[in-house]
Every structure is written in structure tokens, then in C-alpha cells.
Amino acid sequence: MPENTPRPPQHHPWETGWTDTSRAPGTRRLWLAGGLALATVVGCATSIAVMDRGADRTAQATDAPSPSDPVNDPGLISFGSPSPTDAPSPSGGKNGKGDKADKDDAGGAGGDAPQTAGTPTPDSPAGAEPSTSPVPHPSSAAQPKPTVAWRSVRSTNFPYGYWQVDGGLVKLAQANSASERRNATFKLVKGLADGACYSFATADGSYLRHRAFVLRSERDDGSALFEKDATFCPRATSVSGAVRLESVNFPGRFLRHQHFRLRLDPFRADAGYRADSTFRLVDGVA
């Protein structure tokens, strides 16, 4: 029968009181303390990272929503952000629409008309030479559009002188008799060649047109030349309520009376020309 081999006493130190003298006392405790310290550092670092991430999420959640994305996170109710419909509009109105600006009415043939760049100004300083090259006339939006109405044309430097048709030509004379008043009254219509300008029709259906630079009454032959000869554009003057009438196909030439006859002459800066080429469109005298 085999004998039991005795076990080394180091296998049961608690029974025999054996102590390992090959290691320094307390080494096992140092290893345990080091492992605990390492675990503590790792745990603290993990906690700090988790807390920083939570703080970032909290900051993002508390930021006010942008105007383009007013929707909050799903499932959350926000009491800090006002409803977009309650926000005041920049103009102070609820719908963001400002008050409409009043618009001035151009009305009347004698209103000031804007000058086109490059177009000679009738009231320009003495010595100014008007351009002889055709220039575009202002659009219909910039010029007062005449309505169909009966008008008479009166001179400003001869207040009793009206345009009258006499023997096919147009002269400046008083309108005393019924026939003179009838011959001094014209239907003011939109220009045949430019709707922003004027044409003058007579009671018998003819039109005033320039031919050989003399103003006369003739029947419309339907040609483009006739339409241009019978179209005159109003230009503002320094005389209140008065205009100058510029030819649409001869820019720089204006209707003026000379020896009491109406003709188309190039603009001159002298006082006589200015007075002779300034007219008022008044109610028909017929």
C-alpha cells in the first residue's frame, strides 16, 4: 500500500503558517492596488467622455430652431420657441406687406415729360445744338397717353391765337365765328406712329401733318410716312401747363408759328423761338 506523499507546505500557507521568502512582503497587495487604480482611472475617463457628450447633446437640444426648420425633435414639446405665425413681419404688418405707395397721376397733355438721353432739351442754354439723328422716344409708360377728346391749341405768346385750318394749311388766328371755332377744334388721339405721342384729326376725318416742313390738313393715305408726318410728341417747357410738339420722324424739329403760319423748324435757344413754339392744349372752342 503506497504511502501518502506529503505536500509542500506552501500549498497550504494558512494551515502551516508558511511564508514565501522569495518575494518581497506586500507585492500581491501592490499589484491589486495598481490594478484598482488603473480601473479607477479608466472609469473616470469614460465617465468624463460620457458627460461631455451628454452636455453637447443638451446644448444642441436647447438651441433655438432656425426659421427654415422650426420642427423640434420627435416626441419633444418645446415651450421656448414662438410659433412662426406669431412672429411680427419686418414691415410691421401681419402678412409682411407694406402699405402701397401713392402714385402721381400724369394726366393732362401739359405735364412734364422726361427727356431722352441724347435728345436736345428745348430749354437748353444758348448755343446748344440739337441732335439730328433719330432717337427713340420715351415709352408710353413715361408719357401721358391722350384720350379721345376734342381740343384746341392756343399760343402762349398770342393768347387769342388758335391753330386753325384755312385752305388746307394751318394758321394762327382768333376764333370768333362758329366756322372759325369749328376749324380750330381737333380730335386729340394717340399718335399714328407712336402711341405715346399725339395726332390731331379734323372734324372731316383728315389729320394735321407736316409736308415740306409746313403743317397742313390732309387725308390719311395709309402710308408709314403719313403716320410719321402726322405724329408729334409733347415735350416739357418752362411755361406751366404748356408743351412743345416735336416731330417723331425729325427729332430736334418742333412746331412753331412764324408769320402766323405753323411750320416745323429746328430748335433754337433764342427767346423768340421758345415763345413761338410753346402751346397749350385747351378744351375745344367749337
Image: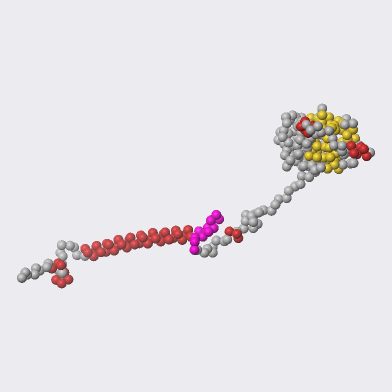
Q: Residue furthest right?
A: 177
Residue at screen point 27% across, 64% down = 33
Q: Quadrant of residue 27?
A: bottom left
Residue at screen point 35% across, 60% down = 45
Q: Nearer the viewer, residue 85 or 277?
A: 85
Q: Magenta-highlighted stretch: main secondary structure?
A: loop
In the picture, which quadrant includes the N terminus?
Answer: bottom left
| Residue 98, percent from left and from top | 67, 53
| Residue 46, percent from left and from top | 36, 60
Magenta span covers which residues?
62-75
In this rendering, the answer to whether 97 lies above or below 188 is below
Looking at the rendered structure, the number of numbered marks drawn on it comes to 0
Specify the color scheme.
Answer: secondary structure
Left or right of 199: which side holds 33? left
Q: Is residue 64 magenta?
A: yes
Q: Residue furthest bottom?
A: 15
Q: Residue furthest front?
A: 222
Q: Residue furthest left?
A: 1
Left or right of 181: which side holds 226? left
| Residue 86, percent from left and from top | 60, 60
Q: Quadrant of residue 199?
A: top right
In this rendering, the answer to whether 248 lies above or below 65 is above
Residue at screen point 91% across, 39% down = 181
| Residue 231, percent from left and from top | 79, 35
Q: Nearer the viewer, residue 36 or 127?
A: 36
Q: Do we see residue 229 in this rendering?
A: no
Q: Nearer the viewer, residue 234 or 249?
A: 249
Q: Is residue 37 magenta?
A: no
Q: Do we see residue 173 in this rendering?
A: yes
In the picture, which quadrant includes the C terminus?
Answer: top right
